[in-house]
Image: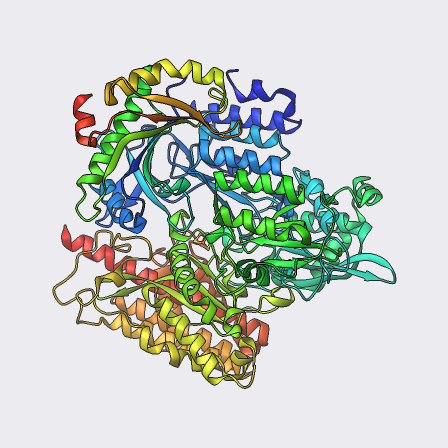
Amino acid sequence: MEPTKFQVKVYTKTGEIELEKLVPVFHQWIREKKIPDELLIDVADYAHVPQGPGVVLIGHQSDYYLDVADDRPGLLYSRKRGFDGDFQAGIDDAFRRALLACKMLEEESGLDFEFETSEVLFRVQDRLHAPNEESTYEAYEPALRRATSIFFGDSASFERVGGPREPFAVRIKTGANASVDETLARA
Amino acid sequence: MTSWKEQLGDRIPEPLAGEVDLFEGQIELKKQGKLDDKIFAETRLRRGVYGQRYDNGLRDDGTGQKPLDFPCGDLTKGPDTVWDAPGMMRIKIPFGKMTADQLDVLSELAEENSDSILHVTTRQDIQLHFIHIEESPDMMRRLAAVGITTREACGNSVRNVTACEYAGVCTTQAFDVTPYANAITQYLLGHPDVQDFGRKFKIAFSGCEDNPCGLVTFHDLGAVAHVRDGKRGFRVVVGGGLGAVPVQAKVLAEFCPEEELLPLAQAVSRVFARLGEKQSRARARIKFLVQKVGIEEFKRLVAEEREGLRPDERWTAFLDDLHSTDEKPIREPGALPSDAPLGFQKWAKHNLKPQAQEGYYTAIVKLPLGDFTSTQGRALADLAREFTGDAMRCTVEQNLAFRWLSGADAVAFYQRLDALHMAEPGAGTITDMTSCPGTDTCKLGISASRGVTGELRKRLTLVEDQLDPAVQRLRMKASGCFNSCGQHHAADIGFTGVSRQVGGRKVPHFNVVLGGQWTENAKSYGLVVGAVPSKNIPKAVELITQHYLENREGDESFQAFIARVGKKEFRKVLAPIQKPPSYEEDPSYYSDWGDPREYGIGDIGVGECAGEIVPFVEFGLQEAEQQLHDAQDALEAGQAAAAAKGGFTAMVTAAKALVRHLEVQVKDDADDVVSNFRTHLYDTEIFHDPFAKGKFANYLLKMHGDKSFEDANEETAHRALDEAQLFLEAAHACYQRLTQAASAAAAE
Ligand code: SF4
């Protein structure tokens, strides 16, 4: 299995987000190379699209969305290419990068963002290798369990979501309620 | 399965399968350094794999240009185009017709390879952005498996063939142009006679003369349906185009019988391939060839070419089954309910149009800036399956049309759209603006056309219910630069991105273009009224519409009002908002809508007195602007020769200002100015535009040489003024480059 095209979405605590505030923040991240091991390229602003990808920080290896799909804003980390490691490491890395980006957003003065860790969404944007079906779930479940235990402990419950035309997706109730900082600290 | 090629197998039809394999092979060869940059660039363009902003590996982050260190090192995918840099894929959707299965696959690609957004273009294509070139072959395979090719979507080829979104269901059409648009698409795709063009070639079909959907007059080749003595045929026009200098197409054939349409298009293609300009891209569109030889000679050349064509059974084979492209409704027809909810009524007012077929309607899904998400795409595909069948069309106004909606289903359809947040009312009104990508993703963008469009949409949507119906009806369009992809020339109020130098800094502006005509297939184009700082564009719209409402006579239309009062009056209206405040007063003017970076500031240093001293050259450029405005007034007053002469004078004045800026002694007479301009600015390439090269300078040199302004008619005077406008823009840009270079030298 290819360790790419993994997505992790961490939801914000507040339901209302002023997306336009993200635009200068993401531009600043590019300017200041805030994510040192990633090449950040540009900002795509889709705030005008309801329930859309919101504001996207486009990178070479990964994109970072402040996504408002399903009317549930959250930080969506999306790995596109270039991961140098095995499958498990790829999944662990996706969770770590998503949480690190959440932490960075929480630390941005003027944004007033807070993320919750009780629920996360995991997706694979690769219908060839990971169609949204039970066999994919069976193949991913052990690695997902390991990744969630690193960050959230051992009481996570999983539910495969979406239909066959949608990307493979697992809703994870983590059973945890720690802050992003604490979550990262325990990993 | 390990690859899409294996997975899809023979669902990828030939010859597409072989073509994609070949392209994949060329990608490998390029990576091994075995293919020339230029050849590879044209190869990928012909496959719809396009460049995107910053793909030269540099990006101005607001404090200066910084390298983007892509891991590919020196590997490029064309001249100055870094391999790893994200690009755009343009996906041809002939006449915008899309099936539910196609929309499903497009949505999958949007989320797997792009950023989950599908973008409808003004030529009925779908574009996906931020694509890595190495993912493109598999994307093409997945598209091919549902009958879509990206072949010849870009490059010097026949682009997507467009047609009215109402073709076949329209109440005013002569007949359904769909089978003809389909036939020409299939016939010319990959045809040997269209492989050697110097530039792109755009074809459009319209079902009637009066309605705007086809917009044939600004296409390289346009066909308008007519029935003569019971026989089907087309009025065929050629050599139209927007771009830097908009040109109305000329009539090639008043009535081309249906069986002659394909051979005529082939003959035109052969003439274009044989005689069209190949060296200078700036003059390579067919409109320049038609202008050069004259329409009568062009007709003769085409007729001669047609005579010599070897007959091809495909010319008429499609006529045997003109119903092959028909859509079959999947629901029984029905009447609209009389007690529909209010929200529905508001939406239906502009978004629902009765079809020629009783009991059926075409519903327009209004897309913000032409965008929708992959999730919405799948849901729309479901709506098509449930209510209309495979009868969706992308529209030139960047929306989606669902045809064959039964009146009985209209409310349910609306409610489903509403649940998707896609039931925005006001299709075809002032809130339904179109825009090109502009500085968001286009390499040539000067100003943020999407940014300003988004801002106007937001503001106007809040007040749309209070707007006077005459204002509601106006169409607004924005282009990020003079290339006019946003089709702003054909709008009541159009905007085109330009930049201006103010106190040593650049300020994003838009030229306001008024009086373009969308109706009658975009019968006339607007003229520039003046440049307004980008941040004042919402105010400009307010002032223009207010002035119209306060001064119109009775229920005079905007078009009639502009024609009566002239653009001169609107220049007075805009004058108070044309000068931006100094940077110290309001720095927000020095960045563009939706982009907090300081606009194009690059490495410019700001001198102590930069905000106060107006250099001599700026006076000269301002004087030239005034002369151009006067010339436009002359044109409005019907004085074509005086107008053209004024355009020429404005260019000479701007040239003189620049020559003097280089500290060269120059006299006031035009000969001396032009001679010095040629020596010091043209031959040295200082005036050259980074992309258009010497194109704009040539407007002056040519007009000075042939004195064409002396016997100008209305059309040539109009063109002369357009050229003068572009020359002035280039003069401003040249001055900015000189200032930058001087600042950089001073800093060193
Ligand atoms: S008009 Fe200019 S900015 Fe807009 S898409 Fe065309 S080339 Fe790009």
- Counting from the top left corner in percent of width and height, residue B260 is at 80, 51
Quarter of the view holding residue B735: bottom left
- Counting from the top left corner in percent of width and height, residue A3 is at 37, 19
Residue sitting at x 36%, y 64%? B731
Residue B708 seen in the figure: no
Q: Answer with left or right where residue A152 lies relative to residue B651.
A: left
User: What colouring style does the render use?
Assistant: rainbow
- Counting from the top left corner in percent of width and height, residue B382 is at 59, 39
- Counting from the top left corner in percent of width and height, residue B638 is at 56, 83
User: Residue B436 versus residue B328: which sits nearer the camera?
Assistant: B328
The number of numbered discs placed on residues in the rendered structure image is 0
Which residue appears farthest toward the left when viewing the image?
A: B608
Q: Answer with left or right where residue B463 lies relative to residue B506.
A: right
Residue B60 seen in the figure: yes
Which residue appears farthest toward the right when viewing the image?
A: B229
- Is B235 situated above or below B86? below
- Is B654 situated above or below B368? below
Which residue appears farthest toward the front when viewing the image?
A: B339
Residue sitting at x 57%, y 18%? B6
User: Residue B375 versus residue B315: which sits nearer the camera?
Assistant: B375
Q: Answer with left or right where residue B209 lies relative to residue B401.
A: right
Quarter of the view holding residue B293: bottom right
User: Residue B640 versus residue B551: which sits nearer the camera?
Assistant: B551
